[in-house]
Amino acid sequence: MLSLLPSQIYTADAVTRRDLVSKALIDERAYIASWMARTRDLWRYIGLSSYAVTLQPPTKYEIKYGVDAVVVVKVHGLMKFFAFEAKRPGMGVSRDFDRKKKGAVWSRFSQQIMRQNALQKMGWVTGALFLDERPQNSALFDPLGSTFVPHADLVTTLPAMSGKAWKAKDVRLLAGSKGISVMDVLRQLVICVNGTPTSEERAEQALINLLLSSDKLTDLEKEFGVESDTRTAAKVLEEFAIPMAVPMIFERSEDGSITKHEKFLTGLLHATGAYHGAMFVVDEVEPELWSSWEARNRGEAT
């Protein structure tokens, strides 16, 4: 069953892009919420378990670790994480999707990329998801869904973005050469080409560490000289931190209680600053895929 997840998520992404093209969806948050809800429902339709939790903070708040949403894949007690920042740069008609304050070296999006470094060190798959409002089957990018650029490829572009905000032309160039489909991202995660499985206990401890470290610079921020920037890490967090007491949307169980999976997702959102979390639980997994997960969890090459 695990091998079905990439195609399920990609199908939901393609349907959601169609809604974006028709202007039924107006922004990144609506896109991600709709996409994850569709995937959740498809997963349930074939008889498997899935859960979702959504934060609803004001749109002015930034993200602690540079991600809008986190997807958790849970297999026999092991978890893998896919986290991304969603952007709508205007693939057809350019739009301002990034900003840089006067006197700052790094733009908001550039710092989000640097903040993801903390999640990368935990073995998560991270990067940027670029939404495309052009008609489907358009050239250069994924013909049906959105386009994902891995974190490593975003980082190599950072030196060229010093002192300026990202523009649509920057994304077109990068996504055209390094972009991959959501199907490919999840396929690489499922077969353990990317990402490290971890136990639920270790994942919970990692989230606690994220909360405790949210006011510290990541290694990438130090490497790119954020300490010497006019906007220090403390100022960034003070300006953009998501408050703990915000409305939540839960998928309730039949008796109205919140499940342990939803409690985990809630903690995940508070720790990372993401506004949407989804978990897909796989109880039946292909033997060869489970062997890869076990080997990667033990630190062996797969």
Image (cartoon, helix red, strand yellow):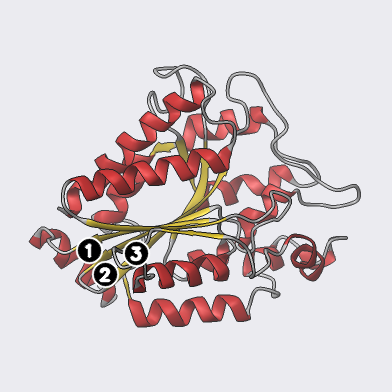
Q: Which residue lies furthest to the right in this view?
A: 103
- The answer to whether the residue labelled 3 contacts the one labelled 2, judged by CB atoms less than 8 Å apart, is no
Name the amino acid type tagged 1: Thr
Q: Answer few, some or many: residues within 10 Å of disc 1's Cα (few below 14, many 20 plus, some between 14 and 19).
A: few
How many marks are shown on the rendered structure? 3
Give the structural element (helix, strand or loop) at label 3. strand
Image coordinates of residue 249 in percent, x first then y, are 49, 57
Name the amino acid type tagged 2: Arg
Name the disc covering residue 296, or none: 2
Location of residue 25 with respect to 78 vertically, above or below: above
Q: Which residue lies furthest to the left in this view?
A: 287
User: In which quadrant of the rendered image does the C terminus lie?
Assistant: bottom left
- Residue 41 in sight from this viewpoint: yes
Give the structural element (helix, strand or loop) at label 1. loop
Q: Which of marks 1 and 2 is nearer the N terminus?
A: 2
**Residue, disc 3:** 80
Location of residue 174 with respect to 259 vertically, above or below: above
**Residue, disc 1:** 302
Q: In this view, does 81 lie to the left or right of 212?
A: left
